[in-house]
Image: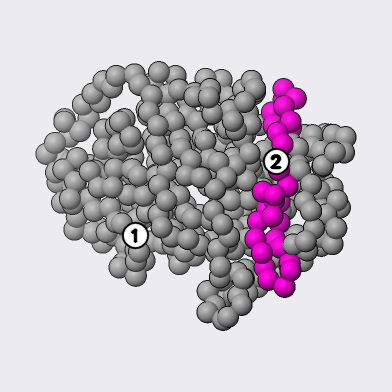
Amino acid sequence: MAPLFYLRSLLVFALTIFDASAAPQAIEKRSFIIERQQTGNVRARNGVAEVARAYRKHGWAVPESMHAAVINATNRATSNQAGSTEATPQEGDSEFLSPVKVGGQTLMMDFDTGSADFWVFNTQLSAAQTKGHSVYDPTKSSTFRPMPFSTFKIQYGDKSGASGNVGKDTVSVGSATVPQQAIELANQVTQSFVQDTDSDGLMGLGFMKGNTISPAKQDTFFGNIAPTLKDPLFTANLRHKTVGSYQFGAVDTSQFVGKMKMTRVDPSQGYWQFPSKSFAVGTDAPVTNPKANPAIADTGTSLLLVDDVLLKAYYSKVPGAKQNDAGYVFPCSSSLPDLKMELGSEGYMATIPGELLNYQGLGGGVCYGGLQSSQGQPIQILGDILFKSQFVVFDARGPSIGFAPHA
């Protein structure tokens, strides 16, 4: 049975349908910056759990051998035993989120370039499922309108996910507002889906092709706001151990060095996807893998998940590195070489410092790598570790994506 608030909203919708279908108010072309905010939640890193989370997010099966490793790592991370290094966060691991107003209610959300869904914790979920979150309440918004017969379903590779109904409401990010942004309101979630996020929701910044609303896909916040911006683009300036920011409508050239290297992307799968065929480890000469899978730039993933050709070449240069059920690990005393990756088809080689690839100390002098396997899947996922090394431009024209080292 539909929740009472949703039935009431349908009645309001029927009475105000002409107002709801009116054209959105014109918005002056502009640019604006969103500074991420430190939540105060400092989490211990859990590398293997983050890898499994990325697999599920993109519909990949989590290997059976990894399941036990995830459970063991999670148990260690929550243990109160003295000397548990995994329960102690590394420096700079505070959680950073961005404030978004939905129907006048402020939520702290993840901006996710690897998805196209706008999902929020809401009052259709139980108190246990929303514990620790700010929760969106449609009944407290005078601008909420249901979308009759529209539903969404986010299905992960291990059958976890969320489903529910859909409405539209006014969404404000910085100084910009979309009057009727599609909002996904879950009424059924699996436990692992709830555990996968520490934010109050996700704001997808991928392409509409990846949106899960049916019978008609809905555009993202960026897709709706792009025509109102000075330039139809946004940038991600997500530096190591700093708050970082997103800017919509303009590129701040003082934030990077050298020339911005732009390359076309393939949006057909809903991702900011581009070729990445060559790489170099440390001071070695570049190697080209003609069979390399394309890569995506994904702010919603923490690590780098790459083809095995690159993965094995990198860890062959790390003394003592080995692969176990959790992925690649190595002695914390080992010096990690820099990794260079070709991003796009224009020959640009981005340098990712080796220090960024030491993701987590596991205890006993063993560390977990920030570079792990994509398990033979058709894309390589370049997450936050890439963004810590590069200023990135997402441009709707083309569409295209650009990279340059941080200033």
Is residue 23 shown to the viewer in this render?
A: no
| Helix, strand or loop at mark 2 | strand
Residue 219 — which label? none
The mark closer to the camera, 1 or 2, is 2
The residue sitting at 37% across, 28% down in the picture is 32
Residue to which mark 2 is pinned: 352
Residue 133 — which label? 1
| Left or right placement of residue 214 versus residue 27 in this view | right
| Helix, strand or loop at mark 1 | loop
Task: Check if residue 352 falls in the magenta segment.
Answer: yes
Instruction: Specify which label sits upstream in the sequence, 1 or 2.
Output: 1
| Left or right placement of residue 253 versus residue 279 in this view | left
247 or 197: nearer the viewer: 247
> x, y percentage for residue 85?
61, 71
The residue sitting at 70% across, 33% down in the picture is 350
Labels in figure, total: 2
**Which quadrant of the view contains residue 278?**
top right
Mark 1 to mark 2: distance in Å? 34 Å
Q: Is residue 145 above or below residue 70?
A: above
Q: Which range is magenta?
A: 342-371
The residue sitting at 23% across, 23% down in the picture is 25
Q: Is residue 164 above or below residue 294?
A: below
**Which quadrant of the view contains residue 277?**
top right
The residue sitting at 67% across, 48% down in the picture is 356
250 or 17: nearer the viewer: 250
Q: Report the amino acid beneath label 2.
A: Ile
307 or 244: nearer the viewer: 244
Q: Sort mark 1 into few (<14), some (14-19) or many (20+) by Cα contacts within 10 Å.
A: some
Question: Which residue reaches farthest bottom?
Answer: 81
> x, y percentage for residue 386?
63, 41
Task: Check if residue 90 falls in the magenta segment.
Answer: no
Q: Report the amino acid beneath label 1.
A: His
